[in-house]
Image (spheres, rainbow, N blue to C red):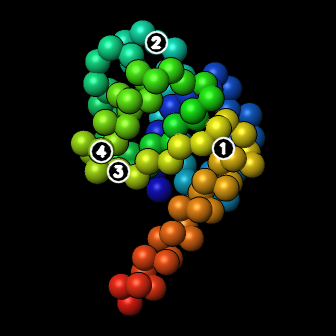
Amino acid sequence: MNAMLVGADRLGNIPGVLDEFGISIAAHVTGRDRAHQRRAADLPVGVEMVILFTDFLGHNVMLRFREAAARAGVELVCCRRSVCALKQALDKRESSRCRRCERRGC
């Protein structure tokens, strides 16, 4: 699965965590560019998930990328920029998907 990361200047150990979940980084945007605050951002082709690191983003940037994810119909994950927070968010995402499948009988 390809993901676009929004927020954080440096990723540190985050690429390794994403690799554990089978997620590759298609694009990384720090969100510091003023253009990201003013206009609706379009997601790169092939992105299946948007991960927002909320402790490094302004509200306008978050809003723009949330809207872009909704328009593109891709999954949105929000968390702080730490390995633990990212793991918890991705674990929660996977467990909720399993519960949905159990209810539908997939």
Callout 1: SS: helix
Give the CA distance from mark 1 to mark 4.
24 Å
Left or right? Give the position of 49 relative to 90. Answer: left
Q: Earlier in the sequence, mark 2 or mark 1?
A: 1
Q: Nearer the viewer, residue 2 or 83?
A: 83
In the picture of the structure, the residue carrying the numbered disc 1 is: 15
Left or right? Give the position of 51 relative to 100. Answer: right
Give percent across and percent down for residue 19.
Answer: 64, 54
Q: Residue furthest left?
A: 71
**Can you tell which of label 1 and label 4 is closer to the viewer?**
4
In the picture of the structure, the residue carrying the numbered disc 4 is: 70
Q: How many marks?
A: 4
Give the CA distance from mark 2 to mark 4.
21 Å
Do the CB atoms of the residues marked 1 and 3 lie less than 8 Å apart?
Answer: no
Q: Earlier in the sequence, mark 2 or mark 3?
A: 2
Callout 4: SS: helix
Callout 3: SS: loop
Label 2 crowd bin: few (<14), some (14–19), many (20+), radius 10 Å: few
Q: Amino acid at mark 4?
A: Ala
Please give the label number shown on residue 53.
Answer: none
In the picture of the structure, the residue carrying the numbered disc 2 is: 33
Left or right? Give the position of 55 relative to 76. Answer: right
Give the CA distance from mark 4 to mark 3.
6 Å
Please give the label number shown on residue 74.
Answer: 3
